[in-house]
Amino acid sequence: LDKRLFALGIAGLCGLSVLFTLTRSVWLGAVVATIVAMLVAPRLRRYLPAVSLAAVMAVLGALLLVPGLLSLSQERAGNDRSVWDRSNSSYAALRMLAERPLLGHGWDTFREKSPPYFRQRPGYPLTGAGIPVHNVLLSNAVELGLFGALAWGLALLVGVGGAIFRRGPPELYPWRIGLIAFALSWGAAASLGPLGYAWPNAMLWLWAGIVCSWRQPIYWASEDERTEGVPLSRLSAPLRIVTEGQVAYSFDTSTVALDERRLIFMDPEDLLADEDVVVTLWPGDPDFSLTLAGRVSGPTGPGHKEIRLFDSPPAESERLQAIVLEAAGERQPAPGTA
């Protein structure tokens, strides 16, 4: 079974499971997360219309074919009781926060202490007493105080936001896009519900830990270091280039010009300028490979592109240079620059 078809089938089942939750916050989070994640990923933008059309058709098909789903969905969408509960509990939480703004009322005490703070309002039945606040930030502010809510928000910003916005190795790029989608979906659920289940909270931090690149062994060179020019050597070697987590280019033999800061190769035509890539070379010895990370800086001549390398030469570089010199015979100018 093709891996892409398998992944597409899993994505379809996940989409249907979102519908079957019969929860409006989950519906909203899934829509927002899908649209935003596909818009921020250049390679996914072109698929957004097709994905949107497929999602609409799948939802309509499920509503028509699954017995009772249409009536349950209509009942859930038109249910005002949960709106009353959210509104009444939120107003009660604000009254409690105004009474003890800095230190709060204590962890997990809202349901016990909130009933005296509920008030009857015109047009709203007095419901929701004894349920948790349907907003995680407001709940933390009421129970932990503004200091506790600020600490929680800062941890969320540094941990999850740092994993999203800090550039990592290209092979983790699909995970980073997935984290954006998961964080948006989680944020929608956290804004409209108590989110008391362990799984979504644990998954958010686990995913952020996978994506976080602080411990990745890549040295990000300064702009001055990236522009240093060194004479290039040329060799023929098997070459693979991975962009944004997907193999974009793979040749059994390719002419490559290499030095400490640059790599010039035959243009595969589908690499974008300013795109981060991981390049793997197998020069002359099938048991020896060299993996380098860099950014495509653009064409250097007819049929060639240049990658500016991010990290310093690894320990194997001396062996690589020996192979380069043996293959080239002598130092030659970069292809396309002679």
Image: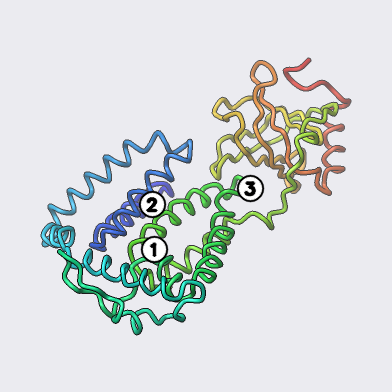
Look at the numbered disc 2 and give the secondary structure of its residue. helix
| Side of 98 relative to 319 (left or right) | left
Work out which residue is located at the far front of the displayed protein and give it: 99
Which numbered disc flags the more N-terminal residue, 1 or 2? Answer: 2
Q: For the residues marked 1 and 2, what is the alpha-carbon distance in whole angstroms?
A: 31 Å
Q: Residue at x 13, y 62 (%)?
A: 75
| Side of 79 relative to 137 (left or right) | left
Look at the numbered disc 3 and give the secondary structure of its residue. loop
- The vertical placement of 86 against 176, above or below, is below
- Image coordinates of residue 224 in percent, x first then y, are 79, 34
The disc at residue 169 is: 3
| Side of 87 relative to 303 (left or right) | left
- Crowd class of label 1 (few under 14; some 14 to 19; many from 20; radius 10 Å): many
- The vertical placement of 129 against 178, above or below, is below
- Circles 1 and 2, Cβ within 8 Å, touching? The answer is no
| Side of 86 relative to 166 (left or right) | left
Look at the numbered disc 1 and give the secondary structure of its residue. helix
Residue assigned mark 2: 6
The disc at residue 190 is: 1
Mark in front: 3 vs 2: 3
